[in-house]
């Protein structure tokens, strides 16, 4: 427990400094490293004791290449936006990046919804899923997640312009939202949880815990609306309802992301994605809930609803 607490504090401190204080190149480099570590962990999970892996090992390199290209590609258009500042190519670079990020996140959200249907099926269905499908899924959600990080951190939602000094309140809110929902689900589930949410994948999760997480998310949303600059644009009932609905759906996606990673680890017969973080497992063990939450919020809040949301 002591080791877990110390590494957790160090991780949160490092994340806070990178996300909210670091200049763009440091932010860029930090998440490039995280992307590389996530690629390594996904490759281990996909090929560890997988009964459907072909004897021909050449496919392993193809799957890994798909994940590498899809994960790292968001950094390319993001860099073009940054280095095009002050030139006539800036508008084209920004439009290209927003189109790429929007499409990537759309398909990722669609994939999350599709997998939401699958995970309630029998364990037989889990076992027949081919590692190619898992690799494509891993590539898509990684690509969408890093696109979402850049969009939320550097794209101003009302003007849709690239801003190095854009507010970090929305990003901080999503972090807090996921943490509050996870904590609420844990304590409520331990106290009164009875009905299993998905026993074949995660026996400890309960329906009561999920409801506790949703309630915690609503409380978190109300606090941010009233005590941070995030509430400056939420001045009508419509906006308030939309904000809370977005928050609840983000939490549901976060819970589902945790279940999806649990499903992949269950197939690989491992407890953690790796041992990189003492007491916490691997990078993917920390990102499993954040990936879908950030992707959903970035797409539906910043990309689709930015102009309409802030005008009605």
Image (tube, rainbow, N blue to C red):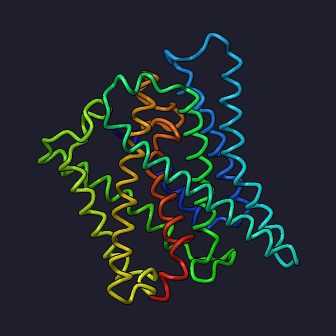
Residue 28 at x, y percent in the picture: 70, 57
Residue occupying the point 27% across, 37% down: 198
Q: Which one is in front, 101 or 221?
A: 101
- Which residue is painted at 55% across and 39% down in the image? 137
The quadrant of the image that shows the N terminus is top left
Does residue 107 appear to the left or right of 184 in the view shown?
right
Which quadrant of the figure has residue 264? top left
**Can residue 121 be seen in this snapshot?**
yes
Residue that lies at the very extreme toward the right in this rendered image: 88
Residue at figure coordinates x 17%, y 50% from the top left: 208
- Locate the C terminus and report the quarter of the image it occupies: bottom left
Q: Is residue 87 above or below residue 195?
A: below
Q: Quadrant of residue 68?
A: top right
Marks counted in the figure total: 0
Q: Position of residue 33 (x, y in %)?
A: 67, 45
- Residue that lies at the very extreme toward the top in this rendered image: 55
Q: Is residue 104 left or right of residue 194?
A: right
Q: Out of 276 and 95, give the one closest to the viewer.
A: 95
Residue 308 appears at what percent x and percent y? 51, 82
- Residue at the spot 46% in from the left edge and 83% down from the top edge: 229
Residue 202 screen position, x and y as percent: 30, 35
Is 256 placed above or below 161 here?
above
Is residue 49 among the parts visible in the rendering? no
């Amino acid at each position: 427990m002591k080791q877990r607490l110390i590494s957790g504090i160090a991780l949160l401190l490092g994340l806070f400094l990178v996300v909210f204080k670091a200049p763009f190149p440091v932010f860029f480099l930090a998440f490039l490293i995280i992307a590389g570590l996530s690629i390594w962990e996904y490759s281990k999970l996909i090929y560890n004791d997988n009964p459907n892996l072909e004897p021909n090992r050449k496919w392993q390199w193809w799957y890994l290449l798909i994940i590498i290209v899809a994960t790292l590609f968001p950094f390319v258009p993001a860099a073009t936006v940054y280095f095009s500042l002050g030139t006539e190519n800036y508008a084209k670079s920004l439009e290209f990046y927003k189109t790429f990020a929007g499409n990537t996140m759309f398909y990722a959200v669609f994939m999350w919804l599709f997998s939401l249907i699958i995970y309630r099926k029998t364990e037989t269905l889990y076992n027949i899923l081919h590692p190619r499908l898992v690799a494509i899924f891993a590539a898509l959600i990684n690509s969408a997640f890093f696109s979402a990080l850049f969009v939320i951190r550097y794209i101003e939602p009302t003007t849709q312009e690239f801003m190095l000094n854009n507010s970090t309140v929305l990003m901080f809110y999503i972090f807090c939202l996921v943490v509050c929902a996870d904590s609420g689900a844990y304590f409520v589930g331990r106290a009164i949880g009875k009905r299993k949410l998905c026993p074949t994948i995660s026996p400890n999760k309960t329906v009561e815990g999920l409801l506790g997480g949703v309630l915690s998310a609503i409380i978190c949303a109300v606090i941010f609306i009233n005590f941070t600059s995030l509430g400056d644009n939420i001045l009508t009932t419509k906006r308030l309802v939309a904000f809370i609905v977005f928050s609840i759906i983000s939490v549901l996606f976060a819970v589902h992301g945790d279940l999806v990673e649990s499903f992949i680890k269950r197939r690989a017969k491992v407890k953690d994605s790796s041992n990189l973080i003492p007491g916490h497992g691997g990078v993917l063990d920390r990102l499993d809930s954040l990936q879908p939450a950030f992707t959903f919020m970035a797409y539906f809040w910043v990309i689709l609803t930015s102009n309409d949301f802030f005008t009605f």
